[in-house]
Amino acid sequence: MTAPRVHTFTSTPGEMDTNSFLIETERSIVAVDAQFLATPARQVRQMIDKIGKPLAALLVSHSHPDHFNGIPMLIEGCGDVPILATQAVADGMRDCADRIRQKWLPMYGSEYPAETIYPNQIIEGGHVLTIDGTEIVIDSLGPGEAPDLCVVWVPRSGDMIAGDLIYDGVHAWLSEQRGQQWIDQLLLVKDRYAHAARFHSGHGGSGSSQLLDNLINYIERFRDFVSEGARDGVIDQPLKSAIIIRTKEHFAGFKQDWWVPLNVDAMTKELGLELVS
C-alpha cells in the first residue's frame, strides 16, 4: 500500500498567506482547510482535480475565516462531501462568519464568498477517519490561537498537520489573548508527537519540531516587548508605536506585519496592563 502524501497550497500575502492541505491516500483525497477568498479556494480545487482522485472529506481545523470561507468553491461539483469539525469549531464559525463578511466584503467584493457552508458532521477530539486503510487522527487542543484548534496526525507518513498551531516566518495571530495557552499547546504537541517526521504550519513552511520552538520563542519575546514597553503599567500611543517598531525589527522579514498593532493591544490586555488611546 502506497504511503499517504501531503500536498500544500499557500495563498498570497493579500489572501493571508494561508495554507490548505491535501492528504492523498491510495484512491482518495482528504482536504484540510479551505482558504479565505474564492480564487485560492478554486486553486486548491484545481490541485484536487489535477491529482485526479475524489474528495473523500474536508476537515476544518478551526473557526477563522481564512480556513473555512472557501468551502463552497472547494467542494463545488464533488457531491455530498463530509465536512468535519468539532462542535466548538462549528459554533465558532457560526459566531463569526456573517460579522466578518460585513467587514471584509467592501474590500474584496465578489472575491469574498457570499455564503458560508458549515460542517455537516460533528466529531469529537481524537476522532479517527479511515480512508483507504489510512488512519487520519483529528486531535482537538481546545482554546489557543482560536477558540478550538485541531491538529491532524497521519501516522503512516509521520505528517503532523499542525495548522495554525504553528506560524513560520509570519507574525502570530495573538489577538485572542491566549498567548500562554498557545505556548502550552505547542509544548504538548511537541511531546505528544515527538516521533513526527514533519510538522506543517498553517502560515509558513514545513519542517522539524524546531518550528514549535521557534514560535514559543516568538510569543515569549513579543510578550517581553509589550511588558518592557509599558510605563507604570500603562501603554500609550507613543509606547505602543515603539513596541511595534521593536517587534518588526526583531522579526524582520516576517509576513503579515499589519497584525502587530492588533497583537500589541491584545497582549496589553492579556498582561493586565492599561492601554491609553
Image (cartoon, rainbow, N blue to C red):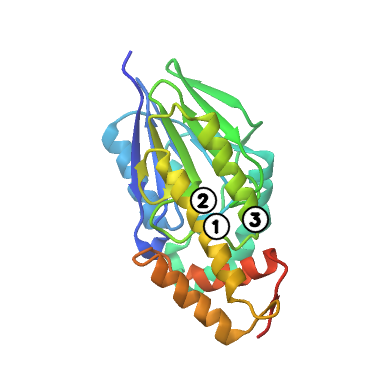
Q: Which residue is mark 2?
A: 216
Nearest the camera: 245 or 71?
A: 245
Estimate the spatial distance between the alpha carbons at disc 1 and disc 3, rounded to whole Å. 12 Å
Please name the amino acid that badge 2 sits on: Ile
Q: The C terminus appears in which quarter of the rendering?
A: bottom right
- Residue 207 visible? The answer is yes
Q: Which residue is mark 1?
A: 220
Query: What percent of the width, then of the height, locates residue 237?
Result: 59, 85
Mark nearer the N terminus (1 vs 3):
3
In the displayed structure image, the side of residue 147 where residue 73 appears, left or right? left
The structure residue drawn at horizontal position 31% and vertical position 37%, both measured from the top left corner, is 49
Q: Nearer the viewer, mark 3 or mark 2?
A: 2
Helix, strand or loop at label 3? It is: loop
- Residue 114 visible? The answer is no
Please name the amino acid that badge 1 sits on: Glu
Q: Quadrant of residue 128?
A: top right
Nearest the camera: 102 or 78?
A: 102
Helix, strand or loop at label 1? It is: helix
Query: What percent of the width, then of the height, locates residue 197?
Result: 38, 29
Q: Which residue is mark 3?
A: 178
Q: The N terminus appears in which quarter of the rendering?
A: top left
Total numbered labels: 3
